[in-house]
Image (cartoon, rainbow, N blue to C red):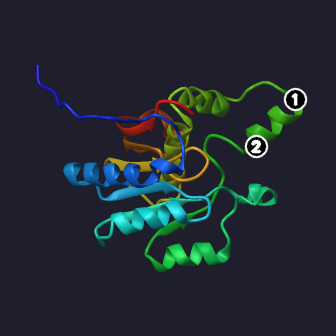
C-alpha cells in the first residue's frame, strides 16, 4: 500500500490572527503540488492582498470572491476603490450569487420555513468549520464564473469572520455538477470557532 503523509495545521481558535500562517501554508502546498490557481474569500480585499503578497509570481491565478451585493446594508460589500486596488495587483475579483447561501432558496426558507438542499450542504460543511463552507462555496462560484479551471486542483483560502484560518486543496466543479467537487486535502483549519 502506498500513501502520502502530510501534516495539517490545526489552529487553537478561529479568526484573523491565523491569516499569515494560513496563507504561508497554502503557498508552500501550492508549490509542492504545482497548483497555480488560488481562490480566496475576501470581503474588503485585505486577505486577498495578503495572498497576492505571498503568491507574488505571475504564474499564479489569484481569484478573490467577495460577498454578494445583497449584503450592502450590513456594510459587508467591497467598495469600488477596494476592488480597484485588487485588480491593480492582478487579482481577479468576482461578486455573485452565493453558491450555498443567500440565494432564492434563502428567500423561500425565510418566508415559509424549512431548509433547502443548499443550506443542508452548508450546514454539513460548517461541521468542519465556517472556513470549510466558505472554501467550497467560493470555489463553486469562481468555477461558475469561468475564473478557475475545473480539470485540475486549486487551493482555496477563507476564514471565520475576517482574515483566513482555513485552506484546502480541492478539485473544483461547477455548482450544477456539485458531486464532481472533491476536497483533496485540508492544509489548515481551526479546532474551535
Compared across the picture, whether 149 is left or right of 30 comes to right
The residue closer to the viewer here, 143 or 158, is 158
Pointer 1 residue: 112
The numbered disc on residue 6 is none
Q: Position of residue 47 (x, y in %)?
A: 50, 60
Callout 2–callout 1 Cβ contact below 8 Å: no
Give the image quarter of residue 24. bottom left
Q: Relative to 128, does residue 1 appear above or below in the rendering?
A: above
The residue closer to the viewer here, 74 or 102, is 74
- Which residue is depicted at the point 57% across and 78% down? 84
Q: Is residue 181 visible?
A: no
- Which residue is depicted at the point 47% across and 67% down? 49
The residue closer to the viewer here, 6 or 10, is 10
- Which residue is depicted at the point 87% across and 29% down? 112
- Secondary structure at badge 1 equals helix
Compared across the picture, whether 94 is left or right of 39 comes to right
Q: Position of residue 3 (x, y in %)?
A: 16, 27
- Secondary structure at badge 2 equals helix
Q: Relative to 33, does residue 189 appear above or below in the rendering?
A: above
Amino acid at each position: 500500500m502506498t500513501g502520502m503523509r502530510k501534516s495539517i495545521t490545526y489552529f487553537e481558535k478561529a479568526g484573523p490572527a491565523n491569516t499569515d500562517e494560513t496563507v504561508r501554508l497554502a503557498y508552500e502546498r501550492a508549490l509542492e503540488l504545482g497548483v497555480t490557481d488560488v481562490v480566496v474569500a475576501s470581503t474588503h480585499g485585505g486577505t486577498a492582498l495578503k495572498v497576492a503578497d505571498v503568491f507574488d509570481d505571475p504564474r499564479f491565478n489569484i481569484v478573490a470572491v467577495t460577498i454578494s451585493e445583497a449584503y450592502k446594508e450590513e456594510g459587508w460589500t467591497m467598495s469600488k476603490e477596494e476592488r480597484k486596488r485588487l485588480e491593480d495587483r492582478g487579482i481577479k475579483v468576482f461578486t455573485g450569487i452565493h453558491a450555498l447561501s443567500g440565494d432564492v432558496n434563502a428567500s423561500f426558507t425565510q418566508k415559509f420555513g424549512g431548509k433547502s438542499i443548499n443550506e443542508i450542504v452548508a450546514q454539513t460543511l460548517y461541521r468542519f468549520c465556517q472556513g470549510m463552507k466558505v472554501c467550497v462555496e467560493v470555489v463553486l462560484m469562481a468555477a461558475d464564473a469561468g475564473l478557475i479551471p475545473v480539470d485540475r486542483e486549486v487551493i482555496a483560502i477563507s476564514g471565520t469572520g475576517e482574515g483566513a484560518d482555513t485552506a484546502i486543496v480541492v478539485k473544483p466543479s461547477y455548482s450544477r455538477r456539485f458531486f464532481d467537487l472533491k476536497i483533496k486535502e485540508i492544509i489548515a483549519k481551526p479546532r474551535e470557532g
